[in-house]
Image (cartoon, grey):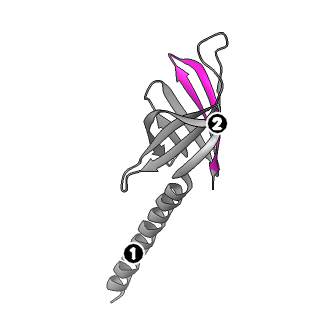
Amino acid sequence: MVRSTLLFSFILCLAANSNQAQTGVEKVDTLLIGSWHGTSICQIKNSPCHDETVVYHISKNSGVDTFYINASKIVNGVEQEMGILPFVYNSKTNQLTSTAHGIWAFNIEGAKLEGTLLVHGDLFRKIIVYKHY
């Protein structure tokens, strides 16, 4: 009887931990999915790179750790799409990263994403965007 009670308690603990993990994933999804607005500041002066006001539309397919950022820049008050990049979420570092067209890394700080783009090892851009509710 004691053995079956212990086994039942163990199973309940596993189920509770599974539900908590799922809740954590859902929180990250809810936080990240949506529109983000901010700036992308060029770090290489005297280059074709320009400072930009940006809008990132973040989406995700269910059941995967990959998020998609559909990036636009604002030109004359209108969004101009620049492209869609895949990003992987790392729960240990609380970062979104991508190796598409350089090395992108965003630290997730609540409703703020602060990140960088490295190209050929050089800091190319610093980006700060805020969740638009």
Q: What residue type is labelled 1?
A: Phe
| Element carrying mark 2 | loop
The span from disc 2 to disc 1 (Cα, nearest Å) is 58 Å
Residue at position x 44%, y 69% in the image: 19
Relative to residue 75, is residue 18 drawn left or right?
left
In which quadrant of the rendered image does the C terminus lie? bottom right
Q: Position of residue 122 (x, y in %)?
A: 57, 17
Name the residue carrying label 1: 10
Mark 2 neighbour density, 10 Å: few (under 14) some (14–19) many (20 or more):
few
Q: What residue type is labelled 2?
A: Gly
Q: Which of 17 and 34 is in front in this view?
A: 34
| Element carrying mark 1 | helix
User: Mark 2 or 1 closer to N-term?
Assistant: 1
Q: In which quarter of the image is residue 1?
A: bottom left
Q: Where is residue 66 in the image (x, y as percent from the top left)?
A: 41, 45
**127 is within the stretch colored magenta:** yes
Q: In which quarter of the image is residue 54?
A: top right
